[in-house]
Amino acid sequence: MSGGSVNRRTLAKGAAWAAPVLVLSSQAPVFAASPVPCPAVPTPTGWTMTTSGSPGSTTTGGYGWTSTAPYSFSEVQDAASRKTFTVTTTTSVGVTAGVTYTINTNVTFNYGSNNANTSKPQTCSLVMGGTTIFSYTTGSSPLTTPYSAVPVSGTYQATSTGLVALTFTFAVQAPGSGGNDDVTVTLPTFSNCVAT
């Protein structure tokens, strides 16, 4: 340096020290979802079953869980003439507040007496802790193809910790001349359980 002039190197060093620094963080935000273990759904011995309404004669079918794995519940009982019939099967599952649970099952149906023209529909629903996971009527989307398993998934957000009811309901309409549609569901499973 001579006579009070500033050379380029000195100026560049000063500028580097004076420049503001922006620091970026790559930490996950506090509200990010964290996977947690999913609960196991009880086998059929851990489910209760109730009926209401008027079932048809015992020769028109039946209802209940299979006794061996893979477990499923079938409702093939017709309602009595000009009557309705409902079957409900329920269990309890432990949940934790703040966790979202994805529940999965498969639903299959067939027309009563294998005849779409004379059979009457049946409605099947799954409710968890008061939240409807699904409610489908046979012959309507997505249950439009007999003997074709339809995968169904839904979510439940736990607002408190404890046991909640997991309930399938099968509502059978007054039958047509060919009886009622038949419905089978697989034992539900949980996946993608995350705390938010």
Image (spheres, helix red, strand yellow):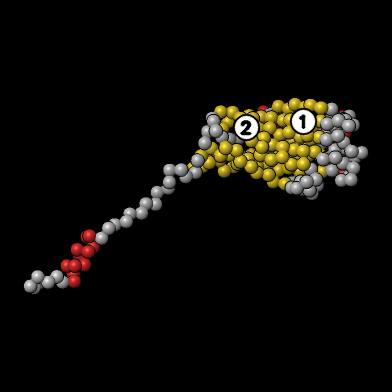
Q: Is residue 176 visible?
A: yes
Above or below, 30 relative to 42? below
Circle 1 — which element?
Answer: strand
Residue at the image position 82 percent from the left and 40 percent from the top: 121
Quarter occupied by residue 173: top right
Q: Position of residue 123 (x, y in %)?
A: 77, 38
Instruction: Please tell me which residue lies in front, 68 or 97.
Output: 97
Q: Is residue 66 visible?
A: no
Residue at the image position 72 percent from the left and 37 percent from the top: 125
Residue type beneath disc 2: Gly
Quarter occupied by residue 160: top right
Quarter occupied by residue 131: top right
Q: Which mark is residue 129?
A: 2
Q: CA distance from mark 2 to mark 1?
A: 18 Å
Q: Position of residue 111 (x, y in %)?
A: 84, 43
Mark 2 or 1, nearer chain start? 1
Residue at the image position 56 percent from the left and 34 percent from the top: 158
Lateral position of residue 67 relative to residue 4, left or right: right
What residue is pinned by disc 1?
Answer: 87
Mark 2 surroundings within 10 Å by alpha-carbon count, few (fewer than 14), some (14 through 19), many (20 or more): some
Q: Nearer the viewer, mark 2 or mark 1?
A: 2
Give the mark count: 2
Above or below, 184 relative to 163? below
Lateral position of residue 18 relative to residue 107, left or right: left
Residue type beneath disc 1: Val
Circle 2 — which element?
Answer: loop
Q: Which mark is residue 121?
A: none
Q: Position of residue 68 (x, y in %)?
A: 72, 35
Q: Position of residue 21 (x, y in %)?
A: 29, 57
Lateral position of residue 140 relative to residue 18, left or right: right
